Image (cartoon, rainbow, N blue to C red):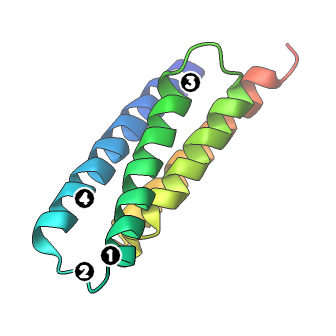
Amino acid sequence: MSGGGLASTTRFLVLALSALYAFAAVAGLIFVDFETTRDTVLWLALLCGGAALMLVGQLATGLSGWASAVLVSIGAAAGGLPLFWTIIVPVAAAAIIACTIALARRTSAPA
């Protein structure tokens, strides 16, 4: 896959997974009966925080490739924790982490 194709695919995956995390946060509040307030806060913090970190890492201008990769990776991993039981979300998070690291390595390599 070419660098441009990988970058655009990764951008799409990051935006899609961020939207999924935000949707899951709202859906969890509506449909899940959390036993304690701590569980509710943890659910929201991981999903909304993960989505926010991914968006900041992907959309913030002026970030180096590695700073972007770190923010996106931490966000993908954090948001994937409460949704680990879905199997597909951790796989998507792992794919995004691998793609962002590959892009960061590609941009920092000498020409």
Residue 31, horizontal then vertical, whole percent:
11, 71
From the image, state whether disc 3 or disc 2 is nearer to you.
2
Q: Amino acid at mark 2?
A: Phe
Q: Are marks 4 and 1 in contact (CB under 8 Å)?
A: no
Q: Amino acid at mark 1?
A: Thr
First in residue order: circle 4 vs circle 3: 3
The crowding category of the residue bearing disc 4, from other C-alpha atoms within 10 Å (few below 14, some 14 to 19, many at least 20), is: many
Residue 14, horizontal then vertical, whole percent:
42, 39
Tag shown at residue 37? 1
Q: Secondary structure at mark 4?
A: helix
Query: Which residue has dot 4 on it?
Result: 24
Q: Is residue 28 above or below residue 50?
A: below
Compute the Cα span from label 3 to label 2: 45 Å
Q: Secondary structure at mark 2?
A: loop
Q: Are marks 1 and 2 in contact (CB under 8 Å)?
A: yes
Query: Which residue has dot 3 on it?
Result: 2
Tag shown at residue 34? 2
Q: Where, by quadrant of the figure, is residue 16 drawn?
A: top left
Return the residue nearer the eye: 1 or 110: 110
First in residue order: circle 4 vs circle 2: 4
Residue visible at 17% across and 76% down? 32
